[in-house]
Image (cartoon, rainbow, N blue to C red):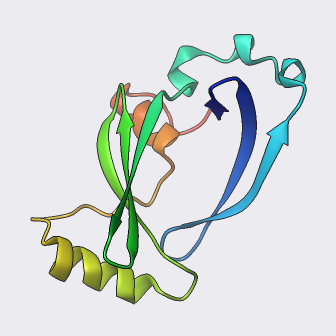
Amino acid sequence: MQMQDAYRLLELRKLDKGFAFVSDTLISDIDIYQLHKIPDHNILHKTVRPWQVGIHSVDLLVFEDIGTFACVNYEDGEYDVAVDFIWNDLQLSNPAFIEVPFNVLKRKKLSLPDFD
């Protein structure tokens, strides 16, 4: 992830329901990752718009090429509370729960296999 002039490596772990951040590491030497060799279909451009709705943290994730998503952040073990918040407090009509990483959504939209 690039934020202004800094790069960070974020690692997520798939849970039974949702995802968890495992690590967030500042990268001092981005050149070792050879980002210029990554194909465009494997790169996501995202803007995060954080919101606080009552006691809940909600990020609007705006991707240039796959759409806008609401991400309700919750602590481990609080999945049911988050789902109740989505249905009852946000009152979203027909929310879809994403169970794959966003890069896979982009690849599916391009009719590519999930991974290279």
On-image quarter of the N terminus: top right
Q: Dividing the picture into quarters, in which one does residue 86 lie?
A: bottom left
Q: Residue at x 62, y 26 (%)?
A: 4
Q: Residue at x 31, y 76 (%)?
A: 54
Q: Position of residue 65 (x, y in %)?
A: 35, 26
Using the image as rendered, state which of residue 54 and residue 70 is in the foreground: 54
On-image quarter of the C terminus: top right
Q: Position of residue 94 (x, y in %)?
A: 13, 65
Task: Name the side, left or right, on which 57 lies relative to 69.
Answer: right
Q: Residue at x 75, y 42 (%)?
A: 9
Task: Name the side, left or right, on which 3 lies relative to 41.
Answer: right
Task: Name the side, left or right, on which 49 lies relative to 116.
Answer: left
* Outermost residue, left side: 93
Q: Relative to 108, does residue 78 appear above or below in the rendering? A: below
Q: Position of residue 102 (x, y in %)?
A: 47, 43
Task: Name the side, left or right, on which 52 lies relative to 43.
Answer: left
Q: Position of residue 75 (x, y in %)?
A: 55, 80
Using the image as rendered, state which of residue 69 and residue 103 is in the foreground: 69
Q: Relative to 91, does residue 107 appear above or below in the rendering? A: above
Q: How many marks?
A: 0
Q: Residue at x 45, y 28 (%)?
A: 112
Q: Relative to 11, does residue 40 appear above or below in the rendering? A: above
